[in-house]
Amino acid sequence: MTETLTTELAVAKALELPFWKSPSNAEILGGGITNFNVKVTDEGRTYVVRLGEDIIEHGVMRFNELSACRAAHAAGIAPAVRYFQKGALIQDYIEAEPLNEAGIQDPQTLSSIAQLLTKVHVDATKLIRGPVLAFWVFHILRNYAETMQLMDSDHRHRLNALMLKAEKLENAVGNVQLVLCHNDLLPANILNENGRFWLVDWEYAGLNSPLFDLGGLATNASLSEGLQKLLLETYFDAHVSDELWAQYSAMKCASLLRESMWSMVSEQTSKIQFDYASYTRENLLRFERAYAALQLG
């Protein structure tokens, strides 16, 4: 964003959009750390306004988010898009509860989420139209490293060691299938509407390996090894081979490194008030533990 938004300014910006006829009851929704989400009622219907500009350092391009949202809606897993302009996206509000770690750890819910991801990777992949970005985590890591060098980041001393580990992880992942992925499977981005599950916040969507979504979900929900294998078995409808487990584990570890380096960059570039330094420390610790368990050297 070009300016530091407060919640008051975000609400004002949302209400200025030309989409409205008689807006009321505008309120900030929690959760976003790269954008603001504003809930607005207009003529008896409720909407969510997502306020956010392109974030070049993170590869977030709003034209891409729009295409992904439309494809996901066509696949029946995301709310409809009602309006779009530079810096603002309006979608239907879903009267649903965001999940948390404990909710995702429920085996029945986890199986339903595996089926939801199949709809992303199969159905939405077939339905997306127009230019779409790639989200190859190892390219993103290399780009983050160079960005931090150019910004003279306080984390420069870590970069050589981290990128050597990233290279080993990329080799361990090996060849992958490319499909449309969500790429930001935080529990709060999965909504439960009386047993029907929705996915929101598609700003990082792009062509990627399904393993990234599966691994990202596992790390964000702190899934046990048993629950991770349940997730994979449900998703692939097959026994988890040693080869698949090794590839998945490497990609899961890479997702933790990406989250860590995303936060390192955000410490210097984000205009949103959030404790990125603590978030960096937390995710780096999780990454180092996961990497050590892989025994890649």
Image (cartoon, grey):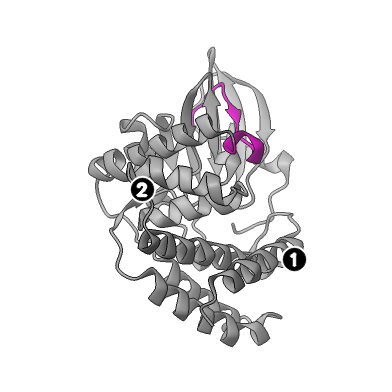
Tag 2 secondary structure: loop
Point out residue 220 in the picture as x, y percentages from the top left corner: 59, 50
Residue at 40% x, 32% y is 77
Q: Which of 12 and 90 is in front in this view?
A: 90
Q: Report the residue that reaches farthest toward the top.
A: 44
Quadrant of the rendered image containing residue 150: bottom right
In the foreground, 284 or 293:
293
Q: Left or right of 239: which side holds 150?
A: right
- Which quadrant of the figure contains the N terminus? bottom right
Which quadrant would residue 176 be assigned to in this image?
bottom left
- Between 50 and 245, which is closer to the camera in this rendering? 245
Q: Check whether the beta carbons of the residues at disc 1 and disc 2 lie within 8 A of each other.
A: no
Q: How many marks?
A: 2
* 141 relative position to 130: left or right: right
Vertical side of 241 occupied by 36: above or below: above
Q: Could you tell me which residue is drawn at 60 percent across and 46 percent down? A: 221
Residue 233, percent across and down? 39, 44
Q: Which amino acid does label 2 sit on?
A: His
Q: Name the residue under label 2.
A: 239
- Tell me if I can see residue 281 in this picture: yes
Which residue appears at 45% of the width and 80% of the height?
167
Q: Which residues, given as a range, are shown in magenta?
A: 91-105
Front residue of 62 and 223: 223
Residue at image location 47% in from the left, 67% down from the top: 250
